[in-house]
C-alpha cells in the first residue's frame, strides 16, 4: 500500500499543472504536445485535399490520442480518490468539476468512432485545447484576468447591453428606411439585424448596405457610435486590469518585491 | 386608508428597481421577462417567414403585454402621488421624468393598434429594453459609467470632433482626386463622406474605394489615422473608468473595504 | 483715443475664446454658428442634386460669410496691435501664428471667387472648422490631450513605426506569394501595400485578398498581428491620459479639490 | 596605435545610437537617410510602371547603398574588437547579436546580386528599417514598451490564445452549419478558419460569409465576441504601459523630477 501511495504521489506531482513553482513537468509537456497534435489532426482531417486516401492513418492516430487521454483521465480519477472520507465521493465530486467534464466530453467521440456522423463530436474534441490555458505560468495570468472580468461584470454586461440596444435601434430604423427598396436584406428587423451587427462591430462584409441617402446618413451615425461601443468595454477592461494588478502588488507587500521577482 | 397605504408600500417595494440591496423583486423579475418577451415579439413579427398566418396570435400577445405595461404605468403613477403636498403635482412631475416619458411612448402603439402603419411606433415599443439597464446591480454600474463619461465629456467630444474633421478632410481630398473617374461615388463631398465614414471607422464595406494611385495612397494614410481616432476615445474612457473607480474606492474608505464586499 | 481703447477692450472680451471662465461670448456664439453654416454650405454646394439651379444663392451666402470672417480677421489684426512696442511688429507676429495663418488661408477662396476651379481652395475653407476645437471649455480638454500625446510622442511614434514595418513585411511576403497568380493586385510591393494597409488597419474592403493557401495563412497571421498594432497606441494613449489627469489633479492641490469642483 | 585608438573613439561616438543624451550624430543622420532611401528604393523597384527602363540606375543605387552599409558593418566589427581579452572573441560575440545578424542578412542580397531571383532576399534588405526603432530617443521608448510587454507576456499570450480558441470554435461550428450549402468556403475546418480569422479580427473582406439563418446568428454572436478579443489585449497593454511608466517615475525619484525633464 506504501508502494501505491508512493506511485500516487509521484503521479500527482507529474500531473500537477504547476511544477516546482514555474515550469511544466515532463508528463505535462508530453500532454501539451499531445493536445496540440490532436487538435491539429482534428482540424486538418476535415480537409479532403489532405485527408482523402489517408483515412486509416487519421483513425489510427485519433485512436492513439484517445487511449492516451483516456489513460490520463483514469489516472486523475484514481488520484482524486486519495484523501480522507469516501473514495468514490471524492472521485464523483472531481468528475463533476468543469475541467473533468470537459475532458470526459472530449473522450466521447472516441467511443462511437466507427460510423457516426462525427461533426458535432469533433467540436467537443477540439475543446481539449482550452486546458492549455490553465497550465504552468498561464494559470496565474488566467486567475488575474478572470478576477478582473468578474469584478467588473456588471459594467461589462452593461456595455454589451448598450451595444445590443444600439444594434436593435439601428436595425429598426434601417428596416423602416430601406425595407421598401431592399426587401431581401432589410425586409424585417431580424434581417436588418444581420447588417446592424456587421456594421456596429466594424466587421463590414459589405454584402448588404443601405442605398438611400437617409439610410447612408443613419449608417454613418451608427458607425461612429460603433466606435464608442468598442471603446467602452476596452476601457472598462483596461481599468479593471490596472486595478487588479495594483491590488495584487499591494497585497504581496511592496512594489520593490514585485520588481525583483 | 391604512389599507391603501399598506398596499402602496408593498407595491412600492415590489416595483423598486433594487430589492434588498441586491436582487430583483418577484414583480420586477416578471416585468424583466415581459420586457424581453415583448421586445423579441416585436422583432420577429416583422419577419414574414415567421409571422405570416399568425397575425392574430401576435396581436393578442401584443395586447396582453400592452395591458400589463399599462397596469404597471398606472400603478407607478398612483404611487407617485403619495408624499407631502399636492398629489397631482407629484404625479405630473413623475410623468415628466425621462423614464416615465419613455414608458408612455412605449404604450402609444397599443392605443392606435388597429390599422395604423406602425413602423415607427414599433421602434418606440422596442425602446422599452432600455429600462433593463437601470435594474438591480446594473444601476450602480450605470451610474459609474455615466459619471466617468460625464467627467470627460469635453475630451470625448473633442476626440469625436477630431474624427469628424478627419472625415471631412478625407472626403474633400478624395472628392478632388477621385471625382473625375468615379462621379457616382466621389462626385460631391457628401457622397465622398459615405466612403470617408466607412473607412475611418474601419467598417470598410468595400462598395466604394479609390481607383487612382494618389487616392489609394491618401486612403492608406487616412486608414492609419483612423486607428488613432479609435484609440483616442478608447484611451480617454479607459483613463476615465480607472479614475472613477479609484475615486469611489477612496470615498468608501479603503481598498480592503471594497475587497471584502 | 480713450474711446478707441474702450472699443478695443470690449471687442477683445467678445472675441476671447473663453468668456467669464466657462461659456462663450455672444459674438463667439455668432461666429460658431457662422463657421458651422459656412462649412455645411461648402459641403452641400458640391452635390449637384442640391446645388444645381441655386448657384447664385450659394455664391451670395459664401460672399456674406467671407465678408463676416474678413471683418473678424481685421478686428483681430487691429486688436493684436495694442500693447507695448511697435504696433505692426505685434500684428505681424500675430499674423504668423498658426491660427491666424489658417484664418487667412480660409479667406483666400473668397478673393478669387469668380471663375477659378476652386476644388483645392474649398478644402482650405473647410479647415475653418478646426477653430471650434479651441473654444470655451474645449480649450482645456485640447491642452490636456495635446500634452498627453506630446509626453508619449516617442512611444506613439514607435508603435506607428512598428505598424509601418509590419505593413511593409506583409506586403513583401504577399508580393512574393501572390504576384504570380494576381499580378494586378500583388504584382509589386507598392501594389501589395494597398492590400497590407487595408488589412492591418482592419478596414478590409475586400477588393483584393490572397487566393493561395499560403497567402491566406499569412494573412491570418497578419490580421491577428493587426490587433496588436491597434492595441498598442490605444494602450499608450490610455496610460498617457490617465497620467496627465493625475498630474493635473495633484498639481491643483488634492483629490477632494477636484471632486468638489 | 594611439592614432588608431583616437579614430576608434571618434568613430564609436559617431556610430553610437544615442549622441549627447538626445539627438543623432551626423554619421547616424546620414545612415538614417540611407536606410530610408534604400528601403524606398527596394519597394518602388518592384513596380514595373516605375522601374522598367531604369534597371541600371536601380542596380547602381543598390550597389552604392550596399557598399555604404558593408563599410558600416566593417567599422562596427572593427570597433567591437576593442576592449580586454581576445579581439576576435569580442567580434564573434558582436556578430552573433540579433542586431548584427540582421545587418549581415541585409547585406546578403548584394553579394549575389547578378542573376538570382531576389524576391525573398529583398525582404531581408527591407528589414534594415527595423534598426530605426533603436536610434536616439526612440531607444528609451523601445525599452519601455518591450518591458511592459515582457512583464505581461503571459496575460497577452493568454488573450491571444483565447482569440485562437474562439476562432477554432467559430470555424468548427460554421463548418458544421454551412459546409452543405457552401462546400468551397466552409467545406473543412481549415477553410472555415479563413472566414473565422477575418471575422473575429473585424477585417471582414466579405469574400465568404454564411448564408443560412443559423450561420448568420452564430456569426453575429462571434462578431460581438470578437470585440472582446480586441478589447482584452488592448486593456492589458494599457494597464501594462500605465504601470511601467509609474514604476519608472517612482524609480527616478519623484513626479516633479519627471515633469521638469
Image (cartoon, coloured by chain):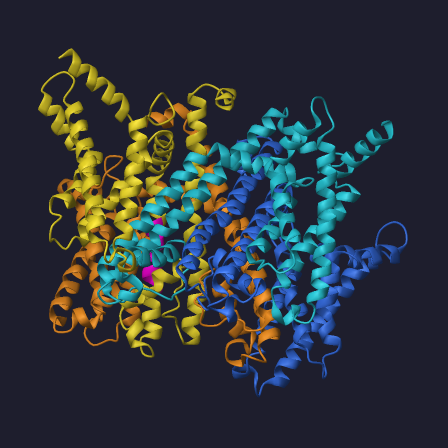
Chain colours: A orange, B blue, C cyan, D yellow
Quick check: can you spot residue A101? no
Q: Tell me if residue D31 comes above or below residue D166 in the rendering.
A: above
Quick check: can you spot residue B151? yes
Q: Is residue D166 magenta?
A: yes
Q: Tell me if residue B69 comes above or below residue B1 in the rendering.
A: below
Residue B104 horizontal side relative to residue D116, left or right: right
Q: Where residue C51 sits: x, y (%)?
A: 66, 68
Q: Tell me if residue B71 comes above or below residue C33 in the rendering.
A: below
Residue C206 horizontal side relative to residue A80, left or right: right
Residue lying at 62% horizontally and 74% vertically, measured from the top left:
A176
Name the one closer to the observer, C167 or B258.
C167
Name the one closer to the observer, B250 or A107.
B250
Q: Quadrant of residue B33?
A: bottom right
Q: Where residue B157 sits: x, y (%)?
A: 62, 47
Name the one closer to the observer, D56 or C51.
D56
Q: Residue furthest right?
A: B86
Q: Is residue C32 magenta?
A: no
Q: How many marks?
A: 0
Q: Where residue C37 sits: x, y (%)?
A: 70, 56
Residue C221 horizontal side relative to residue B85, left or right: left
Q: Quarter of the image containing the N terminus of chain B?
A: bottom right
**What secondary structure prevails in the magenta region?**
helix
Q: Quarter of the image containing the C terminus of chain B?
A: top right
Residue lying at 87% horizontally and 30% vertically, measured from the top left:
C3
Q: Quadrant of residue D119?
A: bottom left
Q: Where residue C238 sits: x, y (%)?
A: 49, 40
The range drawn in magenta is: D160-170
Q: Residue furthest bottom?
A: B53
Q: Residue furthest top?
A: D2
Amino acid at each position: 500500500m506504501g508502494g501505491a501511495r508512493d506511485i500516487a504521489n509521484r503521479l500527482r506531482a507529474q500531473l500537477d499543472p504547476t511544477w516546482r513553482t514555474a515550469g511544466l513537468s515532463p508528463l505535462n509537456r508530453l500532454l501539451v504536445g499531445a493536445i496540440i497534435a490532436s487538435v491539429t489532426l482534428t482540424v486538418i482531417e476535415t480537409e479532403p485535399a489532405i485527408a482523402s486516401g489517408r483515412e486509416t492513418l487519421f483513425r489510427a492516430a485519433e485512436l492513439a490520442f484517445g487511449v492516451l487521454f483516456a489513460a490520463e483521465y483514469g489516472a486523475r480519477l484514481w488520484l482524486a480518490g486519495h484523501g480522507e472520507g469516501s473514495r468514490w465521493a471524492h472521485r464523483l465530486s472531481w468528475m463533476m468539476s468543469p475541467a473533468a467534464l470537459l475532458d470526459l466530453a472530449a473522450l466521447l467521440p472516441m467511443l462511437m468512432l466507427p460510423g457516426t456522423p462525427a461533426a458535432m463530436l469533433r467540436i467537443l474534441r477540439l475543446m481539449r485545447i482550452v486546458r492549455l490555458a490553465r497550465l504552468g505560468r498561464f494559470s496565474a495570468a488566467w486567475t488575474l484576468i478572470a478576477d478582473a472580468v468578474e469584478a467588473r461584470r456588471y459594467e461589462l454586461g452593461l456595455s454589451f447591453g448598450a451595444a445590443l440596444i444600439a444594434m436593435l435601434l439601428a436595425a429598426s430604423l434601417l428596416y423602416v428606411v430601406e425595407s421598401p427598396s431592399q426587401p431581401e436584406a432589410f425586409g424585417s428587423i431580424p434581417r436588418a439585424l444581420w447588417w446592424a451587427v456587421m456594421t456596429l462591430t466594424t466587421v463590414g462584409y459589405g454584402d448588404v448596405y443601405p442605398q438611400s441617402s437617409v439610410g447612408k446618413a443613419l449608417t454613418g451615425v451608427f458607425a461612429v457610435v460603433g466606435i464608442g461601443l468598442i471603446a467602452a468595454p476596452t476601457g472598462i477592461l483596461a481599468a479593471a486590469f490596472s486595478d487588479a494588478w495594483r491590488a495584487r502588488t499591494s497585497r504581496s507587500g511592496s512594489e520593490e518585491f514585485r520588481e525583483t521577482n
